[in-house]
Image (tube, coloured by chain):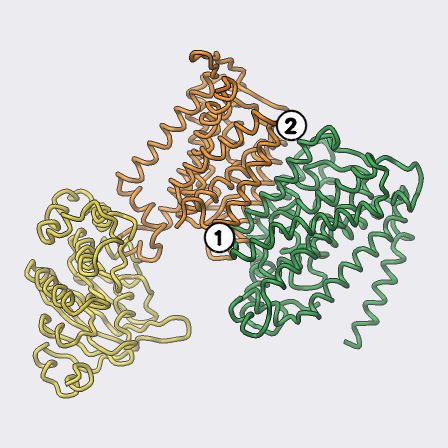
Chain colours: A yellow, B orange, C green
Amino acid sequence: MLTVTDVSAGYGSFQALFGVSLAVAAGEAVAVIGANGAGKTTLMRVISGLLPASGGGFALDGRALEALPAHRIVAAGIAHVPENRRLFPRLTVEENLRMGAFIPAARKHFAERLAWVYELFPRLLDRRRQPAGTLSGGEQQMCAIGRALMSKPKLLLMDEPSAGLAPLVVEQVFNLVRRIRAEGFTVLIVEQNVQQVLDIADRAYLLDRGRIRLSGAAGELARNEEIRQAYMGI
Amino acid sequence: MDIYLLEAVMNGVLLGGVLALLALGLNLIFGVVDVVWIAYAELVMCGMYAEWWLTDSAAWPVLAASAAAIAFVALLGVLVHLLVIAPILGSAPINQLLATGGLLFFLQSAATLLFGTDFRNLGLRLPVIEFGDIFISLSRLIAFVAALLGAAALYLFLSRSFLGTAIRAVAQDREIMGLMGVDQRRIYLLTSAIGGGLAGLAACLLLLQYDVHPYIGLTFGPITFMICVLGGLGNMIGGFVAAFIISQIIAIAGYYVSIEASYVLAFVVFIALVLLRPQGILGK
Amino acid sequence: MTARLPAALAALVLLLLLPLALRDYFLHIAVQVLLWGFIYTAWSMMGRFGLVSLGHGAFLGIGGYVPALLWNHYDLTPWLGIPLSVLLAALLALVVGYPATRMRVVGHYYALVTLALSQVVLLSMIALRDMTGGSLGMTPRSAGRASWYALQFPEKSEFYFLALALWLAGLALWLWLERSMGSKALEAINEDEGAAAAIGIDVMREKLRVTLISAGLTALGGGAYVQYLMYVNPETVSGVGVSLQIVFAAIAGGMYSLLGPTIGALLTIVLAEGLRVAFGTHFIGAANTIYGVLLVLFIIFMPRGIAGLVEGLLARPGRPAAAE
């Protein structure tokens, strides 16, 4: 479904990605793991159009997307749950969800999507009139995921969904990701929380200083000695 | 209570409505595009001339001329954004402020060139109505009610519609708007059009009470900026409240001393408040 | 440095001889350039600190009105009236500048507070119409001849030397400020107050100092301007347009260099006069219409002349952005 071919990118004179290639098939959950500063967030930003690639390209269902601005990539079917959630703090929960359904294709089905997201996350229904900035960390992550789901994306990008959350809440968030998977969404997820993400992913890539070092089935990587030592602290 | 003072207070409330409308427009633009349009009151002047010209020279009915003037100023707002603001969106705030300052010179002089420096008005003489012992001019009452309706329409648009929500969202997190499928440039244009439209509406309401001349913007432009800052730049509700506070100061001081002295007092109060509470009276 | 001194002396001689060569009209323009150059220089003393004032019309108005009022109503010579107005302007700058630096009022807020200040002066002058003539303006009572006591010189060439002396004094003060602080310290303050404080600069004191000097000098310029024109009205000294004009010219010319503000004065005055002559009185407003367009275009298409200077200065600490 998603193919990333030889993507390079950076900020000014600093290059963060060096010829990264990867693929995600429909229905899969694929994880990209790596240390802080390995280029994981940069990769996400390139795929969602926030950062132009300086080389290479990527395509969704065969349609090349690298030349499109971010707002057209959403319409093409990729939704991005950004790092640190980035909710609009003074908009209510429901207004945040409304923003997720901004693209014309989603706007038409706003009411039913809203009902669906509330069914998925009943907590959000309780809080719908509350400013998003007043939610707890876990609820904010629910809201951010719900917001991305409102566009019914073909591919959901998740950038560090567990970052900055208490351990108990991290567990909840990974349960959320499982729910999303169960709904049949294709997910590309970036995480530092290697052990848990490999638990829910089908396949994984190891990103190291801007290059793909290893790839394989998630279970395989979870047993890889190097990964266990360097990223799981075992 | 002194009946004339009561009248002054009433008139202050009525004036506050139109000032609030202007503060809403300016705050909207500042909150979304992050630019202070120093020439905002000059857009109002353009709207007043447009309405006057349409009724006077083209003999349009006042309502049609008003609608056309609002549309005209909305278009001007779009042009201001496209021609003046968009090319320098990334440069220092003071440059953006100065570019719209150049626009201020331009609009004033262009109006002088086109219409001369004579004072013009609609020639409407609306009756004065009596509430008990208080006399209120109908034109002020109409202006007040229309301003409130305009503000309410803006509120509904911003809180209920997708585009309105996006406008509020831009002011909170510019960078991720693309991830919502929102084209930021279009939101800027829409905001500039709405800001212009509000200036146009204010123009029509002001023309009910005042004559238009090329320098009229200078008489209420500065006070509009003060109101916006008092309410907290970009804070629309704050600006709305501040408009009524400032207009009360002007009305009451104007009753006791003189109209200029009342403006002096308003500016002094403004300076004192900003120096004591830089975040605005309603700021956090 | 060795080549600079002879060049400066040669320029000075040329400036001293100028009245012999120029007809009255051009001398009039030269006086205006010197006076406004002086005022813009005074503004830029603050501007280069990041204190962007949109309200110098307030100080200009005090300098313009106070001596004229004292002369007309109390027969007080401008030799006392002007220093009094300078003190008054500095006092006003202190009253506003002290809390502003204290509360760290910056950016848009600073610009708008100062704008409000100029409105206070403008509207006060209009409100005191019994003394000031209101919006119609006023004329200092004429001494009828050239008089040092009245500081009135009907001959343009005589006033030219006065303006030249004033302008030179302004440049000297600018240099003195630069030397006494060191340009490094200046930049440090503009860029990062915390860092400036860390290298031992009392940021607040320095900011207040330039604010007071700048306000006082602007009042001085206003006083000289009114003695020259023998007329003052509220809009021409304290209007929003004047304050914007000061900022525009100083920034366009380059507020970080000694002659930048004067270049700004030359540029804007020659441009405005040229347009006025080109269009005459047939199309009132035509000249200013084009002037306004040029202002906008200048800011959009010459970012190097404006923002470039600022950013260049910030990007390379320790080096003044423009050569003098």
Seen at 27% across and 48% down, the residue is: A91
The answer to whether residue A102 is seen in the rendering is no
Depth check, front residue: C263 or C74: C74
Q: Residue furthest left?
A: A182
Depth check, front residue: A4 or B144: B144
Residue C82 lies left or right of residue C114; in this view the side is right
Q: CA distance from mark 2 to mark 1?
A: 32 Å
Residue B4, above or below C189: above
Q: Residue furthest front?
A: B1
User: Residue B32: x, y in percent?
Assistant: 39, 47
User: Residue C212: x, y in percent?
Assistant: 68, 56
Seen at 75% across and 31% down, the residue is: C131
Residue C202 lies left or right of residue A187; in this view the side is right
Residue B147 lies left or right of residue C249; in this view the side is left
Q: Are marks 2 and 1 in contact (CB under 8 Å)?
A: no
Q: Which chain's residue wears label 1?
A: B
User: Residue A63: x, y in percent?
Assistant: 21, 61
Badge 2: how crowded within 10 Å, few (<14), some, or many (20+)?
some
Q: Report the disc number at residue A98.
A: none
Q: Residue flagged by tag 1: what amino acid is it?
A: Pro
User: Residue B71: x, y in percent?
Assistant: 42, 31
Question: Pointer 2: what residue?
Answer: B117
Q: Which chain's residue wears label 2?
A: B
Depth check, front residue: C68 or B74: C68
Whichever of labels 2 and 1 marks the residue nearer the N terminus, that label is 1
Which type of secondary structure does the marked residue at label 1 adopt?
A: helix
Residue C286: which quarter of the image?
Answer: top right
Residue A232: which quarter of the image?
Answer: bottom left
Badge 1: how crowded within 10 Å, few (<14), some, or many (20+)?
some
Depth check, front residue: A20 or A162: A162
Q: Residue flagged by tag 2: what amino acid is it?
A: Thr
Question: Pointer 1: what residue?
Answer: B87
